[in-house]
Image (tube, rainbow, N blue to C red):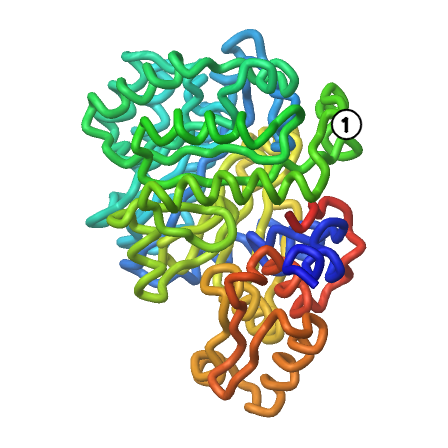
Amino acid sequence: MDTRTQLGRLGLFDAKVPRYTSYPTAPHFAGNVDPGRFCQWIQALPEGGEISLYIHVPFCRRLCWFCACRTQGTATLSPVESYVATLEAELALLKRHLPKGIRLSRLHWGGGTPTLLTPELMRRLIAAIAEVADFAPDAEFSVEIDPNEIDEARLDVLAEGGMNRASIGVQDFDPDIQATIGREQSFEITRRAVDMIRARGVHSLNADILFGLPHQTRARITETVQKLLSFAPDRVALYGYAHVPWMAKRQQMIPSDALPTPEERLDLFETARRLFVWDGYAEIGIDHFAAPGDGLAVAQKTGKLRRNFQGYTDDTAAALIGLGASSISRFPQGFAQNASATSAHVAAIREGRFSTARGHVFTDEDRLRGRLIEALMCDFRIDAAEILRDFSLSRDALFAMLHQAEAAFKGQVQVTGEGLFVPVKARPLTRMIARSFDAYDLSKAGHSSAI
């Protein structure tokens, strides 16, 4: 039996599994985390420590059909201006609760389309953030940039404000695919954006592309990857397109009969993966690639690679605080998510309180299982010595869990006295193997295919 047949029999092509950017995953969040608890968690941060800050801008000039993010279209700047004023008030509220001396290790603007902001709105937001906390040494300020929604003036403001990493969404350069997914963005427009970014000394560049798109073939994804490599990005996220039109209504615009089969999706992923590896990129976890000197590659080599809501990260801050509608924060004590509806979020901030609507308080078992899953997703291995050092459980209890996973994926994972290891041939199953350590109800909606 060949490897692909074995993977198929274990459910690679039909299983629905979480992406595990958190544990537990967001569908399991509940209403027991409110603004009061959110404030307590902020106040419990150590004085003089470091945090990460995520700013969510939920607006787009146009809504791409493939996207399942929480965004809303706008034809005018009026709601954007009002939203920035809300962010300023939210940042001031955060400042009142933060302990003294907190610094930013990471600042990320996501969306939506953060570059929809005018230069003046960007200046206001940068100034409001600066009032809350200073950047730590070697801090990273990254912004998601839409090549269709950027110009010299806005990039000048971002660069002057400290942006030192830019992230661009590519998805696919093929015009037919772009028309089918509602995302028209030519190679020339993208190249111009990259050149403008580089010209301002922003030398760290991220790029996202998708596999599993309608009409995508190995030839087409090869051309897209080769064009992307001409930009020499520092890191690339190769995400699988998740077709969930029952959740993201705009995806109903995409013809499901034009989507590749699960087996074809694997071919598309492998085609792109090989091209990145051949060009010298290190494989990072299940779907990222990094140039040798990039922070993710360094973190992988030193055992400091971690997983968060943006994917893989080298950030070691104890807390990630998300501001804006639907943003999720992570503290040592648990997760907290803001109100998803922009109107509800704005109303809460105007009343002088955070909009925290739900979340999850970690149990000791959550922390253990979360680390087991993160270790698999980052390193394809579980180091028994590390787990026994950091968590209160017996060696017998740990190895009972490891052997259970070994039995479920017979011949695909290896358990030794040092822990559990996923060989290269079985790495497409990583999310499924991670699922075997998930103690929560797996029938929740929103999970995507394993490949």
Question: Residue most toward the front?
Answer: 1
Q: Is residue 73 something one can see in this rendering?
A: no
Q: Residues within 10 Å of mark 1 (few under 14, many from 20)?
A: few
x, y percent for residue 130: 28, 36
Which residue is disc 1 drawn over?
256
- Left or right: 125 with respect to 354? left
Of residues 231 and 89, the one nearer the viewer is: 231
Say which of 198 and 130 sits in front.
198
Q: Is residue 239 above or below residue 145?
A: below
Q: For mark 1, give the secondary structure.
A: helix
Give me the residue at 40% from left, 46% from top: 289
Q: Is residue 28 left or right of residue 64?
A: right
Q: Is residue 182 above or below residue 236?
A: above
**Residue 386 visible, this orientation:** yes
**In the image, residue 105 lies at what x, y percent?**
31, 49
Q: For the N terminus, which image quadrant?
A: bottom right
Judge by depth and name the residue closer to the eye, 380 or 9. 9
Observer-nearest of 92 and 336:
336
Q: Is residue 270 above or below residue 191?
A: below
The residue under the point 48% across, 15% down is: 185
- Is 376 drawn above or below residue 444 in the view shown? below
The residue located at (68%, 74%) in the rendering is: 410
In the image, is 353 to the left or to the right of 236? right
Q: Mark 1: which amino acid?
A: Ser
